[in-house]
Image (cartoon, rainbow, N blue to C red):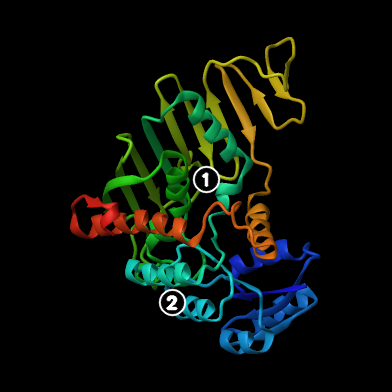
């Protein structure tokens, strides 16, 4: 049985561990964190494995067959290089790195090694992504995409320090940027304005309260992404991604639902009641007034993401991984280009990042 290890036993590590507890075909062998008590808590929850404070000690003693790297954005580098040197396939949480030179160097080593890799863009594995891609295929091309993500400040102490987190675009809204890339194709250039002064000053907070980015895609389409951490209530804004075509639109609420507005024939899987309300046989979609078809997320995206990587390592077939290190790096470049634009006050070509 192959051994699975984890580096980083914080919040995102807990998320992944929750999936691993159901796995019967891998051994949860090692957990590492700079706070030993957190690693030990994972051992106790898993009912197996050993706790470590140094990942190299864990590698020496456990000799894992795969590893999940769940560390903060500023902590990448040495862990990846040592993991690659030892030939261990790895899953790494976004945003991979805060420096493109470092990330490119890691990628170069990955490509030389031929290792299986995956990243934490679990939103790609949602069932509603399939509906979004199908919508684009039906309509030919999206002309305009508009995205808004508004929220508050996470409790993680390093998040508000832009030098440590990369800021909201890079650390948090990168999921939205990645989804837009996955659906729209590659961006050509970005122009981003940032704003501060709306969030009450607090210790360690040194990042943008709000930003708006204008995107030109290589397809010729345009887009905007606005994101902020000033919100104190969910009523602040209806956060979603809207994909607009000449004859329809789709509102994509990440890991929640999609609302599809288009003229289309009723599918064979749907039936209609006397009032014209349409619902699928499994209850996952409903059509209301105005031609809106709603499809609900099934809540399995993260589970599918983790399982896909584990299966790839077990079988040696990585073809079902939707976001390898190489692909995830393109989303990192997308978001870091936004930061560069904020710094310079000028448009930035994404390929040049």
Within the image, what quadrant is residue 53 found in?
Answer: bottom right
Would residue 340 appear left or right of 7 to someone viewing this image? Answer: left
Residue 93's tag is none
Of helix, strand and loop, which one carries label 1?
Answer: helix
Q: Residue 344, how many percent across, how many down?
A: 19, 58
* Of callouts 1 and 2, the N-terminal one: 2
Q: Are marks 1 and 2 in contact (CB under 8 Å)?
A: no
Foreground residue among 226 and 1: 1
User: How would you rate the neighbour count of disc 1 (Cα within 10 Å): few for under 14, some for 14-19, many for 20 or more?
Assistant: few
User: How would you rate the neighbour count of disc 2 (Cα within 10 Å): few for under 14, some for 14-19, many for 20 or more?
Assistant: some
Within the image, what quadrant is residue 12 found in?
Answer: bottom right
Discs 1/2, front: 2
Q: Is residue 2 visible?
A: yes
At 61% across and 84% down in the image, what residue appears?
A: 59
At 27% across and 50% down in the image, what residue appears?
A: 192
At 37% across and 45% down in the image, what residue appears?
A: 186
Would residue 44 appear left or right of 169 to someone viewing this image? Answer: right
Q: Residue 87, how many percent across, how many down?
A: 56, 77
Q: Is residue 295 above or below residue 232?
A: above
Foreground residue among 294 and 131: 131
Q: To which residue does mark 2 refer?
A: 77
Within the image, what quadrant is residue 257 found in?
Answer: top right
Q: To which residue does mark 1 refer?
A: 234
The residues tagged by marks 1 and 2 sit, at their Cα atoms, a distance apart of 36 Å
Could you tell me how many numbered marks the image carries? 2
Of helix, strand and loop, which one carries label 2?
Answer: loop
Q: Residue 40, how many percent across, how many down?
A: 70, 82
Foreground residue among 121 and 229: 121
At 39% across and 37% down in the image, what residue appears?
A: 146
Q: Residue 340, how many percent across, how many down?
A: 26, 59
């Amino acid at each position: 049985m192959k051994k699975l290890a984890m580096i980083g036993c914080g919040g995102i590590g807990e998320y992944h561990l929750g999936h691993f507890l159901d796995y019967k075909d891998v051994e949860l062998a090692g957990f590492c964190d700079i706070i030993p008590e957190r690693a030990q808590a994972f051992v106790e929850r898993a009912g197996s494995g050993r706790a470590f404070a140094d990942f190299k000690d864990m590698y020496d003693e456990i000799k894992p067959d795969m590893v999940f790297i769940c560390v903060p954005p500023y902590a990448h580098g040495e862990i990846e290089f040592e993991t690659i040197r030892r030939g261990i396939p790895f899953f790494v949480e976004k945003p991979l790195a805060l420096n493109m030179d470092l990330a490119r160097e890691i990628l170069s080593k990955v490509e030389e090694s031929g290792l299986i890799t995956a990243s934490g863009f679990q939103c790609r594995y949602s069932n509603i992504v399939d509906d979004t891609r199908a919508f684009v295929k039906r309509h030919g091309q999206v002309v305009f995409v508009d995205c808004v993500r508004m929220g508050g400040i996470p409790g993680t102490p390093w998040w508000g320090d832009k030098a440590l987190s990369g800021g909201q675009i890079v650390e948090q809204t990168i999921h939205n940027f990645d989804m837009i890339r996955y659906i729209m194709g590659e961006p050509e250039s970005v122009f981003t304005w940032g704003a501060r002064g709306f969030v009450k000053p607090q210790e360690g907070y040194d990042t943008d309260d709000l930003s708006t980015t204008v995107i030109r895609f290589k397809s010729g389409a345009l887009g905007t992404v606005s994101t902020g951490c000033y919100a104190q209530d969910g009523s602040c804004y209806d956060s979603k991604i809207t994909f607009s075509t000449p004859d329809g639109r789709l509102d994509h609420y990440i890991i929640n639902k999609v609302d599809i507005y288009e003229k289309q024939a009723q599918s064979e899987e749907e039936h209609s009641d006397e009032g014209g309300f349409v619902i699928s046989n499994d209850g996952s979609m409903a059509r209301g007034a105005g031609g809106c078809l709603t499809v609900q997320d099934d809540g399995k995206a993260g589970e599918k993401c983790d399982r896909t990587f584990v299966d790839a390592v077990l079988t040696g077939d990585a073809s079902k991984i939707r976001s390898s290190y190489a692909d995830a790096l393109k989303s990192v470049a997308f978001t870091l280009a936004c930061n560069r634009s904020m710094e310079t006050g000028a448009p930035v070509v994404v390929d040049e990042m």
